[in-house]
Image: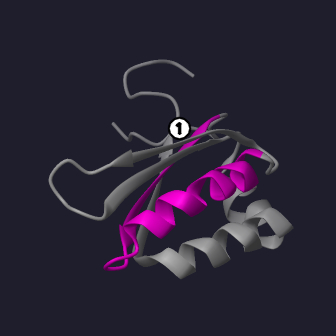
Amino acid sequence: MPLHRKKSTLIIEHATLTIRPDGHEAFLAAFPQVQAHLLASQGCRSVDLYPSVDREAVYLLRVTWDTLEDHTEVFPASEHGRAVLAELQNHAQALDIIHFDGVPVGTSA
């Protein structure tokens, strides 16, 4: 049975950020601005940042979006998207993004 469903009405973005050596404090100082840009973006519902408990300088950025297109098409082309990208490029040495359906497996949409 395939796990894919029709177009989701909620997308959960998980971005694993590895911060540059000695850049931890600067990243945390800049994060409120990143969060503000994300929250001002079309389709962004929430933004949370979680520190890793077992890997120094690694964070999970969890962002919820109305649609995948809001994140992958609208956001990158926007002023807010460009500002977030520039800030993340200043602080992150690695970034891995995965998108998830906002409806858990086994529940109906």
Instruction: Please indicate whether residue 73 sits to the left or right of residue 11 in the image.
Output: right
Residue at image x 42%, y 27%? Answer: 104
Instruction: Name the amino acid type tagged 1.
Output: Arg
Q: Position of residue 34 (x, y in %)?
A: 65, 58
Q: Position of residue 54 (x, y in %)?
A: 15, 53
Instruction: Please indicate whether residue 81 sits to the left or right of residue 7 in the image.
Output: right
Residue 1, relative to residue 104: is it above or below?
below
Q: Position of residue 69 (x, y in %)?
A: 72, 56
Quadrant for residue 24, please give it.
bottom left
Q: Which residue is mark 1?
A: 5
Position of the N terminus, as image quadrant, is: top left
Residue at image x 33%, y 77%? Answer: 22
Residue 34 covered by magenta stretch: yes
Bounds of the magenta span? Answer: 10-39
Position of the C terminus, as image quadrant, is: top right
Instruction: Please indicate whether residue 57 sits to the left or right of residue 77 in the image.
Output: left
SS for dot 1: loop
Residue 68, relative to residue 57: is it above or below?
above
